[in-house]
Image (spheres, rainbow, N blue to C red):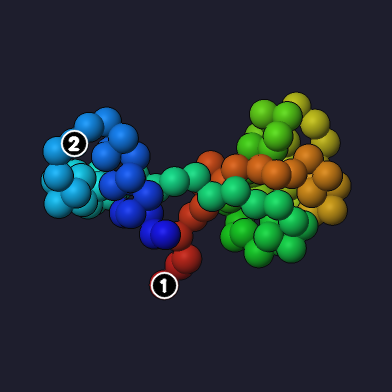
Amino acid sequence: MNARDELRDIILDFDVSHITEAEVIAEAILAAGYRKPRTITTAEELEALPEGSVVRDFMDDVAEKRGGVWCGYETEPMNNRRLAKYLPGTVLHEPEATK
């Protein structure tokens, strides 16, 4: 199921009268910039995130990848394996690839 279909189903739960209306609303929401937050569960997924990415772990602590190291705002820098023990996490920000 893609993001549009998932949004359509959520909208239909609110008694929109026709599936076409729900699809139009879902497209408008996506066009406005909504994206479902990405969940990561492994150290490999952490490693694949680009510099400047920001992740919130299951303890609600936030870390940013700087210089290849995850830097929390209340703790010391940590490597992917150390941060991975606090997964699953939510990617709050992932910089777009430079062109």
Q: In which quarter of the image is residue 59?
A: top right
Residue 25 point in image, percent of width and height: 19, 44
Q: Quadrant of residue 99?
A: bottom left
Give the amino acid type for the residue marked by disc 2 in the picture.
Answer: Val
- Give the left or right position of residue 47, taking residue 92 as reference: right
Residue 85 point in image, percent of width and height: 83, 44
- Give the left or right position of residue 26, taking residue 20 as reference: right
Q: Name the residue under label 1.
A: 99
What separation in Å lies between label 1 and label 2 (alpha carbons)? 41 Å
Q: Which mark is residue 57?
A: none
Q: Name the residue under label 2.
A: 16
Q: Nearer the viewer, residue 25 or 35?
A: 25
Can residue 68 be seen in the rendering of this structure?
no
Q: How crowded is mark 1: few (under 14 residues within 10 Å), some or many (20 or more)?
A: few
Q: How many marks?
A: 2
State the residue at coordinates (67%, 29%).
60
Q: In which quarter of the image is residue 17?
A: top left
Residue 92 point in image, percent of width and height: 53, 42
